[in-house]
Image (cartoon, helix red, strand yellow):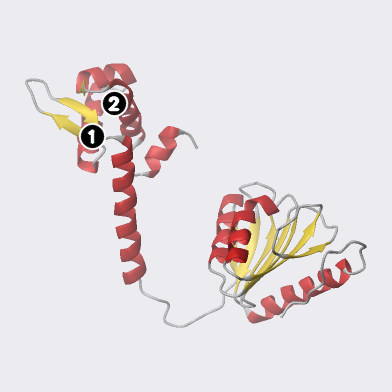
Amino acid sequence: MNLIECLMKTGLTRHESELYVTLCREGELTGYEAAKITGIPRANAYQALAAMVDKGAAYIIEGAVPHYTAVPVNEYCCNIIVNMQEITNKIIDECPKVRKASEPYITITGFKHIIDKIRNIIINTKERVYVSISEKELPFMKNELEEAIKRGLKVVAIISGKADLKGAIVHRIEKPSGQVRLIADSSYVLTGSITGSDNDTCLYSRNRPLVELIKDSLKNEIKLSELVPDTKCTHHTD
């Protein structure tokens, strides 16, 4: 994701993002000057600059010819964070809860979305987390697992390769890369394959039969690891 795309994530359009970068670089500019530098049609540039003022990305300096200047980057980003925190708090507080608890099978598509879900599961784990991965997948969730260990959680990792996870109960087993299985608090399960593609898919659920199925699968992997020399530790799922 480049700078323009990042700015667009804050609510600016592409033209507004390009103008913001230009104002940061050039300083005060008239609408005509900004349009000329960016190559944006003059009418579109004036419209975008006015919108930037409304969105808190630019200030207007009144005069015979109005000039525009960018809101300082740190100030703009701080305002975005504060506003988003207020928005997310309101959503969390006011969004209606499901009337009847259900345990659906949820398909998560796309590598980034899957990794985000894995990280969130680990962050919200209360007691223990079991994960079965190869050394190639570990870096994508290592920070969250290490933080879980620091919080005093029980972390059991079934890992292929030589990767290590200090403070965790580690079992070694040979397995192909890409396969991911995770159980948190004996209640949440995520299973599937990741390759780094937008087409990657994983299944997430609190469905009890699926949790038990994956738990049995991890038990079997742990038993298999006991047959391998130099296994660091043995442990069974709760």
Residue at 34% in and 33% down? 17
Mark 2 / mark 1, whichever is N-terminal: 2
Residue at 67% in and 76% down? 211
Q: Which of 93 and 161 is in front in this view?
A: 161
Label 1: how many Cα within 10 Å (few below 14, some 14–19, many 20+)? many
Residue 58: mark: 1
Provide residue 8's location: percent of width, then percent of height. 38, 40
Left or right of residue 87: residue 144: right
Which quarter of the image is occupied by the C terminus? bottom right
Asked if the residue under mark 1 is in contact with the one under mark 2, i.e. CB atoms within 8 Å, the reply is yes
Mark 2 element type: helix
Mark 1 element type: strand
Q: How many labels does the image show?
A: 2
- The relative height of residue 14 versus residue 225 in the rendered view (above or below) is above
Left or right of residue 212: residue 56: left
- The relative height of residue 56 versus residue 142 in the rendered view (above or below) is above
Provide residue 224's location: percent of width, then percent of height. 88, 69
Q: Is residue 12 visible?
A: no
Q: Circle 2 is placed at which residue position?
A: 23
Provide residue 204's location: percent of width, then percent of height. 61, 67
Q: Can residue 205 be seen in this view?
A: yes
Residue kind at label 1, given as amino acid type:
Ala
Q: Which of 26 and 75 is in front in this view?
A: 75
